Image (cartoon, rainbow, N blue to C red):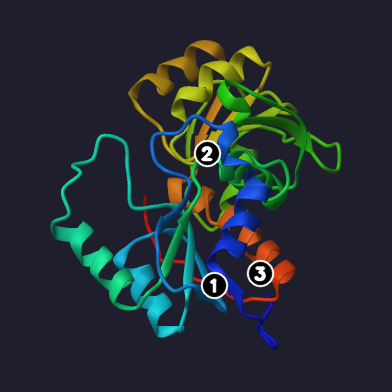
């Protein structure tokens, strides 16, 4: 992490660096990507985390942050737009302490080097062959060492060791696995595209009722390793990259989440 002799840059400079890296204009998303809450005009310290929760905001305040960078911002699909309850509490803290909040959802998932999927693949020792699916959010590849997993159970054990998280596995096949697809977070809907892409296993964060049947009927293993657990790495990599480039101090704070 970049911690020594932090520089001071303008809010616009940081925004331009983030936008230039992720190119959010290329994506159709349900919430705004980029600057979600305007804070101080000058930024010296950046805190990154997965979600703009009150706990993360409070931790950023304790760190003396001028800006927070997250994957999940203040806005979720279909949420009530009124500024009450938890939304009021989060906004009140950000505004009182003049903290800028930057959030990037799908653009961060898709980035081929710094994104959630690229970083998750690296964490799991997977090499990307290509991206697939809607907005190319799905990744397909195989082990970096060229080997195979003896079974879906062996792949699940590997993921659990790498992420420190219990995996939900649905599989009927005991054959070895070479072609692996993955898409972090709540990407249940990409399972069918992964099957069509020729994957023998699909890794994501969550599982819903239909995916159990698709896995059993297709013979493609389905592995859910946690929404939060699968998306801890992209935002830290992006923040560290931009902070190093601009000379900012940066701290990643992981707020535990069992989901």
Dot 3 lies on which element? Answer: helix
Q: Are marks 2 and 3 in contact (CB under 8 Å)?
A: no
Q: Residue 56 placed where, x, y %?
A: 38, 69
Q: Residue 158 placed where, x, y %?
A: 64, 48
- Quadrant where the image shows the N terminus: bottom right
Q: For marks 1 and 2, give the CA distance.
A: 21 Å
Q: Are marks 3 and 1 in contact (CB under 8 Å)?
A: yes
Q: How packed is label 2: few (under 14 Cα within 10 Å), some, or many (20 or more)?
A: many
In the displayed orientation, state which residue is furthest to the right: 146
Which residue carries the number 1 mark? Answer: 46
Q: For marks 2 and 3, give the CA distance.
A: 21 Å
- Give the mark, 2 or 3, whose residue is nearer the N terminus: 2
Which residue carries the number 2 mark? Answer: 106
Which residue carries the number 3 mark? Answer: 243
**Residue at 62% across / 63% down in the picture?**
13
Residue 158 visible in the shown view: no
Q: Quadrant of residue 163?
A: bottom right
- Give the mark, 3 or 1, whose residue is nearer the N terminus: 1
Q: How packed is label 3: few (under 14 Cα within 10 Å), some, or many (20 or more)?
A: many
Q: For marks 3 and 1, give the CA distance.
A: 7 Å
Q: Quadrant of residue 176?
A: top right
Q: Residue 83 placed where, x, y %?
A: 17, 54
Of the pair 2 and 144, the residue shown nearer to us: 2
Drawn side of residue 183 relative to residue 89, left or right: right
- Give the mark, 1 or 2, whose residue is nearer the N terminus: 1
Dot 1 lies on which element? Answer: strand
**Residue at 40% across / 69% down in the picture?**
39
Of the pair 163 and 115, the residue shown nearer to us: 115
Dot 2 lies on which element? Answer: helix
**Residue at 68% across / 51% down in the picture?**
114
Residue 218 visible in the shown view: yes
């Amino acid at each position: 992490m970049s911690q020594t002799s932090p520089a001071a840059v303008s809010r616009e400079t940081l925004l331009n660096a983030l936008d230039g890296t992720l190119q959010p204009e290329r994506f159709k998303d349900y919430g705004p990507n980029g600057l979600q809450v305007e804070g101080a005009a000058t930024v010296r310290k950046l805190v990154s985390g997965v979600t703009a929760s009150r706990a993360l905001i409070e931790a950023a305040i304790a760190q003396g942050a001028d800006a927070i960078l997250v994957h999940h911002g203040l806005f979720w699909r279909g949420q009530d737009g009124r500024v009450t309850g938890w939304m009021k509490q989060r906004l009140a803290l950000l505004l009182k302490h003049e903290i800028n909040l930057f959030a990037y959802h799908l653009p961060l998932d898709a980035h081929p080097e710094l994104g959630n999927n690229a970083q998750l693949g690296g964490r799991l020792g997977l090499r990307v062959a290509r991206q697939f699916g809607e907005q190319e959010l799905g990744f397909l590849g195989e082990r970096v060492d060229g080997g195979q997993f003896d079974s879906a159970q062996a792949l699940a054990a590997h993921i659990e060791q790498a992420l420190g998280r219990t995996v939900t596995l649905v599989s009927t096949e005991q054959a070895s696995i070479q072609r692996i697809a993955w898409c972090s977070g709540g990407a249940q809907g990409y399972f069918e595209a992964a099957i069509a892409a020729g994957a023998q296993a699909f890794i994501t964060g969550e599982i819903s009722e239909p995916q159990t049947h698709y896995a059993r009927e297709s013979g493609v293993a389905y592995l859910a390793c946690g929404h939060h657990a699968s998306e801890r790495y992209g935002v830290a990599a992006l923040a560290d990259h931009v902070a190093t480039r601009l000379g900012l101090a940066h701290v990643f704070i992981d707020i535990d989440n069992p989901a």
